[in-house]
Image (tube, grey):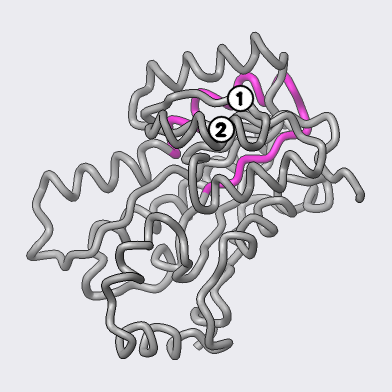
Amino acid sequence: MEMRLKDKVALITGGASGFGKETARLFKEHGATVFISDINSERGKTVAKELDIDFFEHDVTDSKRWEEVINEIEAKAGSLNILVNNAGIGFISDVESTTEEDWELVHKVDLDSVFLGCKYALPLMRKSGNGSIINISSISGIVAGHNFAAYNSAKAGVRHLSKSVALHCARTTDLVRCNSIHPVFAKTEMMQAFFENASEELLGKLEKQIPIRKFAESIDVANGILFLASDESKMITGTELVIDGGLSAQ
């Protein structure tokens, strides 16, 4: 098998489940040295042992912890070429029903953590060269829903922040690219409770909104992340990769 990430070092936040776990597995298969981080220490250690990679317990809203994680990666691996800002939470609520506390939490986890990741990883990525930042947004960052007020806002912020970071990197000629990924509804651990509790009728309606009539799987998103992490995408920066089965084309 072609090793598309040979000699590259990667950090994947939220790596204990879902897109993060699948991406870690794929990166390892393609030759990368992989570090995952997650606030769920127990699950993170299990995944790290399963994949034979390193794990950091990591609250991605904590700037001090970001500095520590980046420093530990530099000490262990000497470089950092790929950052996947994947950690996030889902939240369903309309603007009137959303409390200020919920609004702040969603933005802290889903948007502020991406800012912190880019800010604190960039110095090491600049020194390492040939880098790629991949920020996981959502189709909800492009297409709004009446009951996703905070989530829509945070994920749309990730999309535009990624463009700003890309332009900053290009301007400072530090050989680091930045793009965002926008998946449609996917069967991940984060969405497990929703899929288990939703009626067949509701799931059918959601599926019909997707032109190709199926939900995304973690591997669909991981394959997109792999492409943006590899040198195959060396001319792609400041854009979004939409993995939505045609939903936003309607």
Foreground: 103 or 192?
192
Tell me, yes or no, whether the highlighted magenta stretch contains residue 154. no
Residue 96 is drawn in which quadrant?
Answer: bottom left
Identify the residue at horizontal 43%, vertical 30% (top origin).
116
Which circle marks residue 166 in the picture? Answer: none
Query: What is the x, y in percent for residue 38?
Result: 44, 33
What residue is pinned by disc 2?
36
Foreground: 38 or 156?
38
Pointer 1 or 2: first along the chain: 2
Is the residue marked by circle 2 packed among few (<14), some (14-19), or many (20+) residues within 10 Å?
many
- Left or right: where does residue 173 sit relative to residue 58? right
Segment tinted magenta in the rendering: 114-135
Q: Are marks 1 and 2 in contact (CB under 8 Å)?
A: yes
Identify the residue at horizontal 51%, vertical 41% (top origin).
85
Magenta stretch, main secondary structure, is: helix
The answer to whether 6 is drawn above or below residue 23 in the figure is above
Residue type highlighted by circle 1? Asp
- Left or right: where does residue 84 sit relative to residue 224? left
Distance in Å between CA atoms under marks 1 and 2: 6 Å
The answer to whether 78 is drawn above or below residue 126 in the figure is above
Residue 166 is drawn in which quadrant?
Answer: top right
Query: What is the x, y in percent for residue 59?
Result: 36, 28
Query: What is the x, y in percent for residue 14?
Result: 47, 40
Is the residue marked by circle 1 packed among few (<14), some (14-19), or many (20+) residues within 10 Å?
some
SS at circle 1 = strand
Identify the residue at horizontal 41%, vertical 19% (top origin).
65
Identify the residue at horizontal 20%, vertical 43% (top origin).
104
Residue type highlighted by circle 2? Ile
Foreground: 66 or 165?
66
* Residue closest to the far right: 2
What residue is pinned by disc 1?
54
The answer to whether 69 is drawn above or below residue 75 in the figure is below
